[in-house]
Image (tube, grey):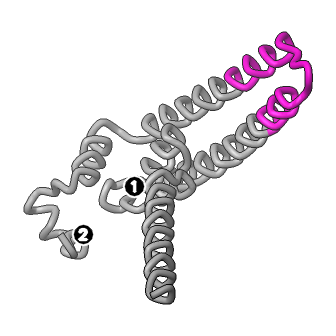
Amino acid sequence: MKKKLTGACLGIFVLAMGISMANVYAYDFRHSKQKCGGEIDGMFYKKAHMILENYSELGIPEETVEKTKNLQLETNKAVIRQNAEIEIVSLDLAAKLHEYPVDVETVNKLVDQQYELKKAKAKSVVGAITQLKSILTKEQYEKLRKLWKGGLSKEDKEKNPMRNRGR
């Protein structure tokens, strides 16, 4: 009897752990920002990727493609630097909060500094998005929007049948 009860308890425990681990994995997978960056910088990376993937369909010259690649590289470097600065301030803030007694004035300055850095990062990425959009003409931008939404016209699909694979 004890063996059955122990086995049942062990089985329930393993089942509960498996379910909870699946939830943790699913939450992390859904909320991971490592693939495309954060919200606003992810928007920049997606736009740049779409332009570089579809430059021939958009009719973009090679020099503009190089500009786009350089802008993407410089923005990526800037975002990495800004994320590092934000992380450093975050570590300083955590260290100050672990001290006893907590110096509220210093902590408030660090919080302000952290959010000023985040604001500067967001503004620089917005500037990069506007630079990226200014590379395209109005017609190219409209065609890019159609490509993004998957709404190619029939003649566009006939010109490039590989674009429609899997849809």
Q: Could you tell me how far apart the alpha carbons at marks 2 and 1 are, in whole angstroms?
A: 13 Å
Looking at the image, the residue that sits furthest to the left is 154
Give the labeled residue for mark 2. Answer: 163
Q: Position of residue 79 (x, y in %)?
A: 67, 42
Secondary structure of the magenta portion, mostly? helix
Of labels 2 and 1, earlier in sequence is 1
Mark 2 is surrounded, within 10 Å at the Cα level, by few (under 14), some (14 to 19) or many (20 or more) other residues, namely: some
Picture layout, residue 151 above or below residue 104: below
**Going 60% across and 45% down the picture, which residue do you hit?**
71
Res. 34 image quadrant: bottom right
Looking at the image, the residue that sits furthest to the top is 105
Q: Could you tell whether 54 is left or right of 107 in the image? A: left
Q: Could you tell whether 122 is left or right of 23 in the image? A: right
Looking at the image, the residue that sits furthest to the right is 100
Q: Magenta includes 64?
A: no
The answer to which of 85 and 163 lies nearer the viewer is 85
Res. 104 image quadrant: top right
Mark 1 is surrounded, within 10 Å at the Cα level, by few (under 14), some (14 to 19) or many (20 or more) other residues, namely: some
Give the labeled residue for mark 1. Answer: 50
Residue type beneath disc 2 = Arg
The magenta segment: 88-116
Q: Position of residue 132 (x, y in %)?
A: 48, 40
